[in-house]
Image (cartoon, helix red, strand yellow):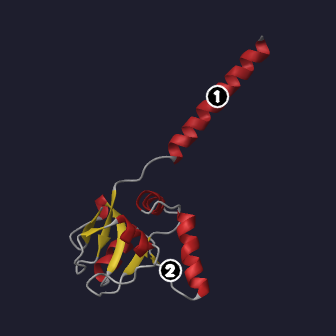
């Protein structure tokens, strides 16, 4: 009887501990938006076009301007949320696709920035740029795209 009570308590303790750990890692990031250089005329973009742009398969905006893609580091929670929610791929799948382009000589990877502040500065100052930022970091130097 004593052994089964101790095992039951142990199992309960492990379950509670795992729940606490999972709750800490499953935290959602702050709401974010897709942002572009102010000169980009597009105000809406299809999900397929967004996937093609960040998959480095769509290189030109409809007005003929070159697309410049900026992303956060692979281990960034914002990058993970963006990859999964907007592109429907895991960050490692995106990295694998970019690496194939680079190593085969048929394309290049997007430019990785180190912080939200750098993302804002680079997108705001690079013609044709696209990236993503948390809503709290967005200001009037960039346009926000609506994704349909």
Q: Is residue 123 left or right of residue 104?
A: left
> Can you tell which mark lies on residue 13?
1
**Percent x, y for residue 115?**
42, 69
Say which element carries label 1: helix
Q: Quadrant of residue 12?
A: top right
Q: Is residue 105 left or right of residue 130?
A: right
Residue at image mark 2: 109
Q: Quadrant of residue 6?
A: top right
Q: Is residue 146 left or right of residue 51?
A: left
> Which residue occupies 59% across, 31% down?
16
Q: Is residue 82 left or right of residue 130?
A: right
Tell which of 32 and 46 is nearer to you.
Answer: 46
- Quarter holding the N terminus is top right
The vertical placement of 87 against 118, above or below, is: above
Say which element carries label 2: loop
The vertical placement of 115 against 68, above or below, is: above
The vertical placement of 100 against 134, above or below, is: below
> Which residue occupies 43% across, 60% down?
78
> Which residue occupies 36% across, 82% down?
67
Marked residue nearer the N-terminal end (2 or 1)? 1
């Amino acid at each position: 009887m004593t052994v089964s009570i101790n095992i039951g308590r142990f199992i309960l303790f492990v379950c509670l501990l795992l729940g606490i750990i999972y709750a800490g890692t499953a935290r959602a990031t702050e709401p974010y938006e897709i942002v572009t250089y102010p000169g980009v005329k597009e105000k809406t973009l299809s999900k397929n076009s967004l996937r093609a742009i960040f998959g480095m398969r769509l290189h030109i905006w409809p007005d003929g301007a070159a697309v410049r893609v900026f992303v956060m580091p692979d281990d960034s929670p914002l990058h993970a949320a963006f990859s999964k929610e907007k592109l429907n791929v895991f960050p490692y799948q995106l990295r694998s696709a970019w690496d194939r382009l680079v190593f085969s000589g048929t394309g290049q990877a997007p430019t990785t920035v180190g912080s939200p502040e750098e993302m804002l500065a680079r997108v705001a100052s690079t013609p044709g740029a696209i990236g993503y930022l948390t809503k709290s970091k967005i200001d009037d130097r960039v346009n926000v795209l609506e994704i349909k």
